[in-house]
Amino acid sequence: MISAVEALARLREGNLMFAAGRQPSEDRVGPARRKELVAKQEPIAIILGCSDSRITPEFVFGQGVGDLFVIRVGGHAVLQAQVGSIEFAAALLRTPLVVVLGHSGCGVVEAALKNMLSPLKLPENLRAMVERVTRSIQEILTEPPEAVTEELIDRGVRANVRSCVEQLRHGSPELEEMIQNGRLRIVGAEYSLKTGLVDFLPD
Amino acid sequence: MIAAAEALARLREGNARFASGRPPLEDRVGPARREAILSRQEPIAIVLGCSDSRVPPELIFGQGLGDLFVLRGAGHVVTPVRMGTIEAAVEELGTGLVVVLGHSGCGAVNAVLENMGSPLRLPESLRSGVEQLTRSVEEVLDGPPAAVTEDLLDAAVRANIRASVEQLRHGSPELEQMVRTGRLLITGAEYSLKTGLVHFLEE
């Protein structure tokens, strides 16, 4: 099994290729690759990302079929189902790395900030999502904002990534233990819609 | 915004290309595409799929950046936040199609079948997902199975897809109304790890 450091290096390299407009070779997605994977998967990383159609983890990290175990939900909100999926991959597939992948211009973060400014009237399920992300942002952005600017959304995006990384690190006794034993590393990253580049946030 | 029927046709066509190893017709992933979707996304479909690294919706449906709004979690379990995310996509982006995408050899469904009748001491975070998966596959079972055969796993995968489709159709008053008024079509599909082909269940 690949190490977290090596997995990170592959993701960085793949992202540089993607941002430069180069794509992974055909053999990472074609029938031959598929055949290798019929009986088992061995992903190099677990990605918790946003549902936004513009941030496909496989594309932005230049990876193919079978390379990334992916959990996606609006604003990469950390809830039990997400934690459960991550544990499944970390424990059973022994994947050594989790990347929480936020992105510039995140609509869910924008909605959460607007909700902080003046509570939005939302149906139940949508409210559950926006409130979850609002709580993540509040851990870092303690003062309610005066106006929702692009700069504030940028800060909100990073706050949300950092907060989700922290929530995952202490998301369950099982995840905590894997981190303590050095079997699992959890990092945050931000994707820029403009440049196509992923910026890994310092720990 | 494109109609659900046309979106379905594009997904079928893209999947046929993928399965036969042909690349997508045009570059949907490079810098030009990124530029085109910089300020807004207009996905043709919402996909609720599994986290399994072998089933990336964009690749198996032959779609590019910005084409699919994607939710992924082990066993495509339906949760309130996932429903909220789907509601947001229908409401804000006008997307008119949801595909619940299961797949052959699903590890989450297999784990549930293997552990039925001998209750696992599961970590808290896995419990609710496993319980929901158990309820979803129970309809194909006559009590805990003596052995998990390939046929049984196939039947359980399909039962789980149908259950997620039903849960989404009746999951919230908002989704129910979107379906009733014809704004939203929710359908189930199964991906074969062997052939690379997607089979839509209601055809």
Image (spheres, coloured by chain):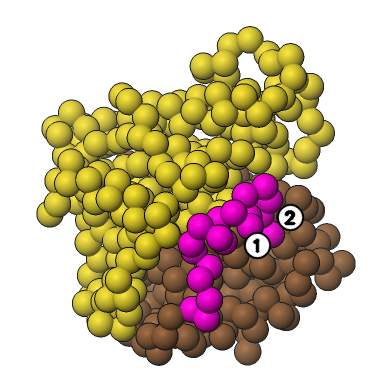
Mark 2 on the same chain as mark 1: yes
Q: State which quadrant residue B175 falls in.
A: bottom right
Q: Which residues are magenta?
A: B24-42
Decide if residue A78 is on the left or right side of residue B9: left
User: Furthest-right residue in view?
Assistant: B181
Q: Residue at x 57, y 16 (%)?
A: A141
Callout 2: 10 Å neighbours few (<14), some, many (20+)?
some
Which chain's colour is brown? B
Q: State which quadrant residue A173 falls in.
A: top left
Decide if residue B181 is on the left or right side of residue B69: right
Whichever of labels 2 and 1 marks the residue nearer the N terminus, that label is 1
What is the drawing colour of chain A?
yellow
Q: Residue at x 42, y 85 (%)?
A: B22
User: Furthest-top residue in view?
Assistant: A143
Most foreground residue, B151 or B186: B186
* x and y, in percent, of residue A185 in the image: 24, 36
* x and y, in percent, of residue B85 in the image: 64, 49
B176 in relation to B191, above or below: above
The residue type indicated by label 1 comes to: Pro
Q: Residue at x 57, y 28 (%)?
A: A154
Chain letter for mark 1? B
Residues at marks 2 and 1, CA–CA distance in whole angstroms:
8 Å
Residue matched to label 2? B93
The residue type indicated by label 2 comes to: Leu
Residue B26: say if magenta: yes
Chain letter for mark 2? B
Decide if residue A148 is in sight here: yes
Is the C-beta separation of discs 2 and 1 under 8 Å?
yes
Residue matched to label 1? B43
Say which quadrant the C terminus of chain A sits in: top left
